[in-house]
Amino acid sequence: MSELTNASDADIDDAVQHAQPLVLHGLLHQLTGDEDLLGLNPGGGAKFDTGSDTTNTDDEQKIKAKAAEFLKRFRDAGEPALDIGPIDRLRQSLSLTAAYDIPPGDLDIWLEELALDRWARGVEWKAGAAPAARSGFKVAVIGTGISGLNVAVQLKRAGIPFVVFEKNADVGGSWFENRYPGARVDTASRGYTHLFGYDFPFTHGYSPRDVNLAYFRWVVDEFGIREDIQFETEVEAMVWDDTAQVWGLTTRTASGSQTATFNAVISCVGFLSRPKLPEIEGIETFEGVACHTATWPDEFDVAGKRIAVVGSAASGYQTTPVIAKSAAQTFVFQRTPNWCFEDKAYVKELAPQVGWLERNFPFYGNFVRFRIASTYNPALIKSALHIDPDHVDPDSVNLGNKAIRDACVGFIRRKLGARPDLVEKMTPNSPPMASRPIRVDADDSIYDALMRDDVSLVTDGIERITPHGIVAGGKQYDVDAIVFATGFRANDYLWPMDVRGRDGVKIQDVWKVDGPRAYLGAMVPGFPNLFMCYGPNTNNFGGFTVVDLLEMVAQFALRCIAGLIEQGAHSVDVSEDAYWRFARILDAEDSKMVYMDPRATNYYRNEQGRSSVNGPIDIRRMYRWLHDPAGNDAGPRDDGLSPRFGEDLIVA
């Protein structure tokens, strides 16, 4: 018997109290067609994980009562097979869950996000059946982070031969490497999944490192790709053979180097994968434990020790509150403060009733996923990110950005008000979103840690490191361990691999002009059949989540490969002209973005002053560009860009 069959009326009534009312609002309308729901407005509840923040609790309770009655009827009827209901009702239903109108022209991308078809971002063979020629086309995939696993699962399902190379001993990429105390994703768990994994049973609204790693391991085993991964194997070099139309890869394991050839390569090596240590005099002389947050030793226990945390980005702000709870003394060395966005549920575990709803309420998980994406509406997100030239305020770039800043400053003052010195030191001088925003728990954050008697904030510049500690502002701070939360070589894409394309050209030489670029974040001219996922300018700022854009880029690569197989072709490259046309579109969008504010200095901008990292283009445009490169789409072109075989894409 199912959980729902065994549930009492009281169990159901209790469970729906833990549901998000906006999710229920649209879902119930879709499943029942209840017109009374159109007259209810629970308010724009922002929380999509536990409980809600609503403005109309009466309507919220009416919706929940209707949800409970629906579930009871469904239970009493024996849980019959249930489809999603009329497709022509979906736009209105989704609009109820989003709390704004979904435009008819955008419905396709929103329906895909709903995950009714979990394979919507994979290979679609034009003839329906997979061609026999696919068996002779072999793909190399580099990395087993969220992009690498997506690509591997999609290739497996399409029947295209592939090998995945992973330098670590297990899957997970940065989530395998980053095991520091407090490591946690800052995207809602339901939005930090593959489309095909939307129903994984998450236990947290924002998953801690171990839960993220459990998800990655589940993907590998659930979809049967572990046997296709070569662990502890690092790709050192890739060289294109233009005569044979293949890539030659050199890999290294503990037993030495090997070479192999592949028809195509999909690099999924994320840009936050190579730790960056600061250049500080005497760093090599320290006699205690010293580690980067991404190389945390398994046996390292901070209990009872004096700990220095150097750095104030996400990992520093995440780990400090956890370290402080057991360390004897914690010193936070901060050069520049970052904006913190409070969330009431950030470090809290989901109530078990939430998981029960996802297992027993038809399509609840789909609508939760949609609700998360709807909070990153590409049409509305500009209100926080785009520079308004007519906005007159030295601390913000537009009215929406000012509202965010006011909320963040209010949070700082609420937490640190008893220490005016800390308020001043923890208030950034750049607008919110000009650097990476850091999501923190409303009740357990870096601010709470700084109010402890055994935590000290040091804002003097570090002068040198000694055998026993750190000298800053002329003062010696004796510590037992130094934790470097100093980020990554974010702008060194594909480093340290030696990547050489046509005529032996190094990809790093192509990028010398103004930093890494890629057509649609995926391709570079002169490097046929080489695709990047989480390549240049795909750290998504254009709406939806980062994972959504990564899956769309992967879809583009996969469908290019499928197109080559179907057409009996050997290679696809992007034209030089198209590469620079996209670059001009990208740069024009970049110039409007808040992260170009000169007061912010971080990995969002490279040495040449542009962003090689962030993707500012509206995801709806990216969706259409990336959707069907090998198809016969004769539709209108967008800004002169035509990512299709025979147009921007050169097939041989």
Image (cartoon, rainbow, N blue to C red):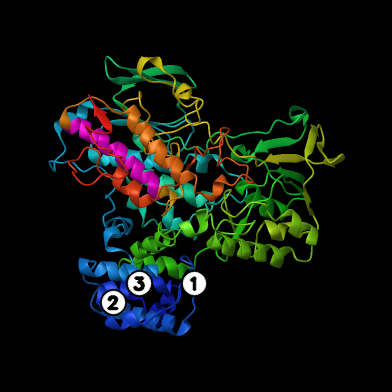
- Residue stretch rendered in magenta on the structure: 548-566
**Residue at 27% across / 72% down in the picture?**
30
| Residue 164 x, y percent position in the rendering | 37, 32
* Between 290 and 23, the one nearer to me in the picture: 23
Disc 2: which residue: 75
**Residue at 30% across / 68% down in the picture?**
362
| Residue 594 x, y percent position in the rendering | 54, 50
Q: Are marks 1 and 3 in contact (CB under 8 Å)?
A: no
Residue 96's mark?
Answer: 3
557 versus 34 height, above or below: above
Amino acid at circle 1: Gly
Sequence-wise, the earlier of marks 2 and 3 is: 2
Residue 473's mark?
Answer: none
Q: For numbered disc 2, what is the local secondary structure?
A: helix
- The quadrant holding residue 643 is top left
Disc 1: which residue: 51
Amino acid at circle 2: Arg
| Residue 331 x, y percent position in the rendering | 77, 47
Q: Nearer the viewer, mark 1 or mark 3?
A: 3
The magenta stretch spans residue 556: yes
